[in-house]
């Protein structure tokens, strides 16, 4: 029975990682469609969204069945509850990527407002946060998880920088307002994806150390 349970936990992890790979692709396609002005890539985002939603339901169902059938305790229970939280965070990331795709659809109907420099840079940082958050989950790596948390400030700074620059475009000419607002919204969607990656990193710390650090990461540092 224990071996069967371990196999099911392994399958759960694999499904989470597959879901994460779909979400990473969604983020990549949504930004690439904007930067390269390729509308066909937006369709890939929408196609992936349907699959991500189906997998979310599947994973939640699997987690509940594992708890009901095996009544896990300690580390195994923390793993399953963390998997459920990560599952939700990944689905929300997919929603944000879809929001970026929606904004791209509008922006591609008009001439570019400006060369996109900070938005792709912000997207690259966020994509790395997503990848690292899942890597630290697989490796149970608290140090990597803490690096993900630290990167969140960098993302916030870039979002503020993008807002300030686009504000100057809006003030210069009212015709720029709609396009600038869409780009500002995209930066906010990217920030939210970074927040979800941060939440996953926090869940990993809970999984490995058994400590909830959502509001007191510094306490973890003090006890090292």
Image (cartoon, rainbow, N blue to C red):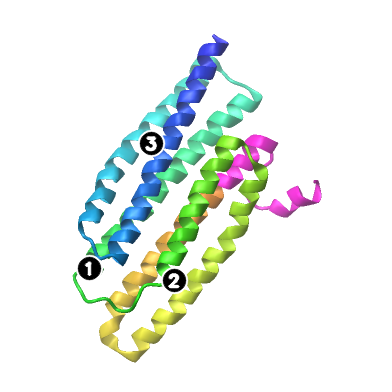
Q: Specify whether 68 is left or right of 111.
A: right
Residue 137, quarter of picture? top right
- Disc 3 crowd rating (10 Å Cα; few below 14, some 14-19, many 20+) is many
**Residue linked to disc 1:** 108
In this rendering, the label closer to the viewer, 3 or 1: 1
Vertical relation: 188 (above or below) 69: below
Q: Residue at x 54, y 18 (%)?
A: 6
Q: Residue at x 27, y 76 (%)?
A: 112
| First to last magenta residue range | 200-224
* Cα–Cα gap, marks 3 and 1: 31 Å
Q: Earlier in the sequence, mark 3 or mark 1?
A: 3
Vertical relation: 190 (above or below) 202: below
> Is 207 a magenta residue?
yes
**Residue linked to disc 2:** 118
* Cα–Cα gap, marks 2 and 3: 32 Å
Residue at the extreme bottom of the image, as rendered: 172
**Residue linked to disc 3:** 56
Front residue of 38 and 193: 38
Q: Specify whether 218 is left or right of 157.
A: right
Total marks placed: 3
Q: Main secondary structure of the magenta part?
A: helix
What secondary structure is marked by label 1? loop
Q: Residue at x 43, y 81 (%)?
A: 165
Vertical relation: 222 (above or below) 67: below
What secondary structure is marked by label 2? helix
In this rendering, the label closer to the viewer, 2 or 3: 2
């Amino acid at each position: 029975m224990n071996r069967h349970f371990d196999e099911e936990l392994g399958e759960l992890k694999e499904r989470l990682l597959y879901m994460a790979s779909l979400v990473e692709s969604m983020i990549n396609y949504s930004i690439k469609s904007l930067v390269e002005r390729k509308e066909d890539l937006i369709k890939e985002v929408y196609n992936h969204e349907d699959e991500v939603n189906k997998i979310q339901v599947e994973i939640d169902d699997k987690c509940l069945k594992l708890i009901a059938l095996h009544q896990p305790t300690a580390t195994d229970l923390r793993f399953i509850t963390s998997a459920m939280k990560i599952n939700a965070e990944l689905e929300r990331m997919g929603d944000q990527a879809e929001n970026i795709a929606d904004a791209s659809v509008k922006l591609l109907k008009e001439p570019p407002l400006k060369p996109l420099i900070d938005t792709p840079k912000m997207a690259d940082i966020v994509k790395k946060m997503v990848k690292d958050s899942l890597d630290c989950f697989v490796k149970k790596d608290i140090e990597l998880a803490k690096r993900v948390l630290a990167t969140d400030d960098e993302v916030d700074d870039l979002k503020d920088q993008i807002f300030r620059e686009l504000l100057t475009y809006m003030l210069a000419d009212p015709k720029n307002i709609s396009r600038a607002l869409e780009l500002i919204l995209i930066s906010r969607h990217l920030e939210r994806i970074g927040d979800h990656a941060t939440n996953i990193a926090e869940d990993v710390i809970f999984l490995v150390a058994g400590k909830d650090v959502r509001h007191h990461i510094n306490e973890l540092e003090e006890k090292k």
